[in-house]
Image (tube, helix red, strand yellow):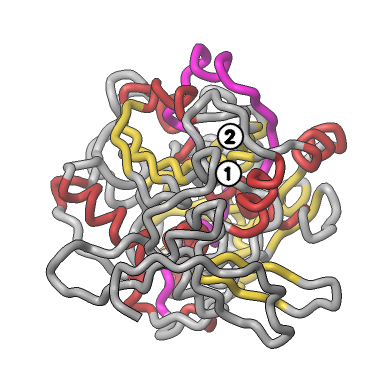
Amino acid sequence: MPLGQQVAFDSLEPPDDLVHQAPDLGEVAADRRDLRPQSVLKGVAEPRREARFELRRSDGERLDLFACTFEGGVDGGGLNPPRGRAVDPFLRALDRFCVHGAAGYRAGRMDLEELDYELPPELIAQEPAARRDESRLLVYERSSGAVRHRRFSELPLELGGELVVVNDTRVVPARIPIASPRGEVLLLERVGGEEWIGLARPTRRLKAGRRYGPVELIEHLGEGRWRLRLQGEPSGVTPLPPYITAPLADPERYQTVYAREAGSAAAPTAGLHFTEELLSRVDVERVTLHVGLDTFRPVTEARLEEHVIHGERYEVSAAAWERIRAAERVLAVGTTTVRTLETLARDEPLSGRTELFIVPGFEFRRVDALLTNFHLPRSTLLALVMAFAGIDETRRLYAVAVEERYRFYSFGDAMLIL
């Protein structure tokens, strides 16, 4: 068939053994015309993102529909119409259940090198923006591949009625110095009464049963982790990531404005950009996950699936989960919020520990959009973003962020994935 010839196809039922089907459900013209052979020409233009739609038949069989690079579009503007325009219910359902899948997912099998990327050291933010919502916001639409650059204060302009779910955990002053041997204890998680799990160093010179200042070490759990007893409430200093070398003038800038439930060893940093005024402009619901070792421990195994998750505590009220469960679309603020929501979406109790490890190939059941910071290489957080946006797309977005001089990590800028 000559390249460029227009051919009309009759409507056919897909065969039972269909696995891949070329037309993009969001781009083929409504009259089934304008279906042209795709030209394979190098050096002309970069092909558009290949989206994957996963459908499940009533008998449980999975149908994977891969999108091609057609120019036409469904009447109504596709899955992400301009803000403020009504969305067809079918397209909204299709967006929720289908657009999460992306070509290249490998069901958790992933080499560690795929979590690497180059970052100029000067792009590591050493201090927060002068005003929380003055940070930059990279916006990415998965359905179209479009990228926009905004200020975080413009976030409401990018939303279309999503329920914004935040993690209201509060960072404890968990970094406690010890004098002899000179070192420190980092509290990770309270396990009951005065007992905690924490990291202590220098581990080889510390002994179980000994008291070091307000800390009594009870049992070494491996990898520098100890079960310990703390005298009184935590009264150390706010723990900052090791890549932040400048002192923090105001410790509250490492807390979100909605922080309420103390218990974290690190801040859910995607929420650091919100101000009270900005919160008043969106529909907000709260969950709690206390950030512990698993959120910031780097991956060291050669393959991602060999990494072990120790688990973190979460709690969600029944009323909050009912709102979240019933919401048409949910925007999760931060990777910790994603883990909480996707844990509950798998019929887990409203409070407990989650060991959910989200990697490429993961099926998202409740999160429709993600707001997140830019994460360290070789981290489980970056793997989660790749699971949501796609491996190649995440790499492309990070390259764009570097080229556009976005600020990275805890005090850096943010990315909105729609």
**Left-right relation of 329 to 118:** right
Query: Which quadrant of the figure contains the N terminus?
Result: bottom left
Q: Kindly indicate the quadrant of the structure image that contains residue 225.
A: bottom right
SS at circle 1: strand
Residue placed at 43% from the left, 46% from the top?
Answer: 141
SS at circle 2: strand
Badge 1 is on which residue?
A: 264
User: Is 281 covered by the magenta stretch?
Assistant: yes
Judge whether 269 appears above or below 351 on screen. above
Return the mark for residue 227.
none
Judge whether 11 appears above or below 401 on screen. below
Asked if marks 1 and 2 touch (Cβ < 8 Å), the reply is yes
Front position in the image: 395 or 315: 395
Name the amino acid type tagged 2: Arg
Residue placed at 61% from the left, 69% from the top?
Answer: 10
Return the mark for residue 170.
2
Question: What's drawn in magenta, residue-wise?
Answer: 271-300
**Left-right relation of 301 to 369:** left
**Left-right relation of 197 to 272:** right
Percent coordinates x, y for residue 400 in the rendering: 23, 51
